[in-house]
Image (spheres, rainbow, N blue to C red):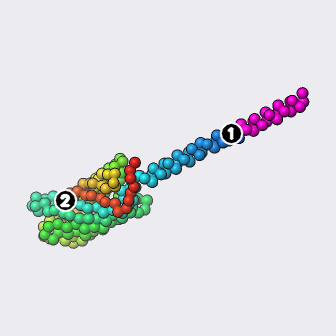
Amino acid sequence: MRPVAALLLGGLISCCSSSGAASAQTAGNPQAVESAADSVRRDEASMRPAHALDSPSLVFAAGVFALVEAYDYPYSFGVTYVARPLTAWRLAPGAGFAVGPDGIAFMYVDVRRDFALGERWSFTPSLAAGWFINGDVIGPRDHLEFQSGILFSRRFDNGLRLGLAGLHISNGGLEQPNNGTEAVLLTLQVPLQNQGTRK
């Protein structure tokens, strides 16, 4: 009986060892599956468009330079270059110009911050300072002028953003009288780098 008992004991030990190895492999499989899933998620993330201001962009604007009937609502056309956001505050520096009738022009540097409103909409406040040429048409009378603004925009699948901006231009109280003007503009923001294809 002893040889038979020894054989049974050896078989039992062998079965236990095989079962332990299989359990170890099974325990390892979720890690492999998880790694594969992580890889898929990374691939999908790489195909989604980046944040609108992660890429340098050009913002084209057209609208009304002054919402004042006495000035006959002069037109405004302009373009702004927006660089990548900097610092943890995601402040994006830029520079641009706007022109209007009868010699109106405004050349400026600005900084803006993009806030997401859901998946496609954005709210963007901005602050600029620059050189204003009045052309004797609208309110501001000093060459040094400041511009504050807000922009609401919607991003499309191709990365373009269409928006509506409201701006205020004045000398910030540095001189009196502090004449100013308000502008309303339609904007089109065009990324200068490929942002991928949205899934």
- Where residue 113 sits in the image (x, y, percent)? 35, 58
Q: Give the range drawn in magenta.
A: 1-19
Mark linked to residue 104: none
At a point 19% along the width and 63% down the height, the residue shown is: 76
Please state which amino acid type lies under the numbered disc 2: Gly
Few, some or many residues within 10 Å of mark 2 (<14, 14–19, 20+):
some
Label 2 element class:
strand
Left or right: 85, with 26 as reference point = left
Left or right: 119, with 10 as reference point = left
Given contact means CB atoms under 8 Å apart, are the residues at marks 1 and 2 in contact?
no
Mark linked to residue 22: 1
Task: Report how far apart the C-alphas of labels 1 and 2 lie in the structure.
Answer: 71 Å
Q: In this view, does 154 lie above or below 129?
A: above
Quadrant of res 58 = bottom left
The first of marks 1 and 2 along the sequence is: 1
Mark linked to residue 63: 2
Residue lying at the far top in this picture: please name it: 1
Label 1 element class:
helix
- Where residue 44 sits in the image (x, y, percent)? 45, 50
Residue 12 belongs to magenta span:
yes
Residue 149 belongs to magenta span:
no
Quadrant of the image containing the N terminus: top right
